[in-house]
Image (cartoon, rainbow, N blue to C red):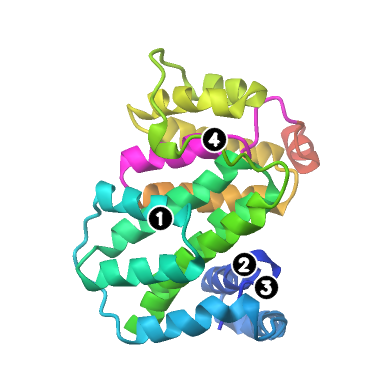
Amino acid sequence: FGMRDFTNIGHNPIFTAQAHRTLQQIGWRHGTDVLRSLVHGLLDGKPGAADATFVANRERAAGLVLPRSPGASKAASLDLATELRRATPEAASTAAAEALAKGLSPGSVWDAVRLCAAEQSWRDPGVLSAHAMTSMNALRYIAGHARGAGVQAMAMLQAVAWQVLYRDFLSARGSYDRDAPGLETLQPAETQADANAVFTAAAADARAAAPLALAAASHGAGELMATARHLVLQKAHEHHDYKFTAALLEEMQATDPQTAARLFAASLGYLRKPADRDHELWALVAGR
């Protein structure tokens, strides 16, 4: 039910996944109040345009047997990601379902959704575009923990359709750069830079720093990811900083190094930077 509708730009699956994550850590003996709050939030939606993708995707998912092939095809992922730039939610879901029915690996579909989510931050970095990544991460979490194959397929198809909804929602804003080149066009810089240099450059111009990030990631993205973790702990402004960074790093770990590097490079605009002010709690703890 958490992935039923797009009300409030996709917070329902985020709430569902985060409630499950939290209770797994603190214990289900605390579950009553959490689940009451969750159910109350899920009842906020109304039938209509916000749940149109659910109605159609439920029918697609019912007859879909997901392939067991573990690998991902970069070419197939890029083709689907390109389709997500121009298709309607209906057409994108149909294309994904047909490709899966023909044997396309689920990993290829998730890579396409990851690239599309990161591209929203690439075109319009900010708290609204951050939800394209955090909601796809939540839907993938739901797919990974669902027991029924139909629910797994449903979460994947909803993730595909919702990226189109994010694209349409965000592209109506004046700050959205429709003409920015796609992530597949990014090339690594010829010069090497360490993680701190990448983040410092991104503070001045995140898009210009993207090639530096790709070059830095060519020897492994571990230092970039560790720096992002440190900066969000030290300098988070509010909870979306944590949500976005955690979702991004988790998706990077779930894909191949080349795709992970592009996800990171495209996300520099929303990640915390070395010159950002420290959070008050960090200053308090560091002073002791």
Distance between the Cα atoms at labels 2 and 3?
Answer: 6 Å
The amino acid on which the numbered mark 2 sits, given as a three-letter code, is: Gly
Of the image marks 2 and 4, the number of the one nearer the N terminus = 2
Question: Disc 1 on helix, strand or loop?
Answer: helix
User: Are the two marked residues, 4 and 1, in contact with CB atoms closer than 8 angstroms?
Assistant: no
Q: Residues within 10 Å of mark 2 (few under 14, many from 20)?
A: many
Look at mark 2 in the image and give the residue it sits on: 10
Residue that numbered label 4 is attached to: 180
Disc 3 is placed on an element classified as: helix
Task: Give the residue drawn at x 36%, y 53%.
Answer: 111
Alpha carbons under labels 1 and 2: distance apart: 21 Å
Q: Amino acid at mark 4?
A: Ala
Dot 3 or dot 4, earlier in sequence = 3
CA gap, disc 2 and disc 4: 25 Å
| Residue at which label 3 appears | 7
Q: Can you tell which of label 1 and label 2 is closer to the viewer?
A: 1
Which segment did they paint magenta? 256-276
Q: For residue 213, which numbered disc appears in the image?
A: none
Disc nearest the viewer among 3 and 4: 4
Q: Is residue 33 above or below residue 7?
A: below
- Quadrant occupied by the C terminus: top right
Closer to viewer: mark 2 or mark 4? 4
Give how far across and how far down residue 201 sits, in percent: 59, 20
Residue pointed to by mark 1:
83
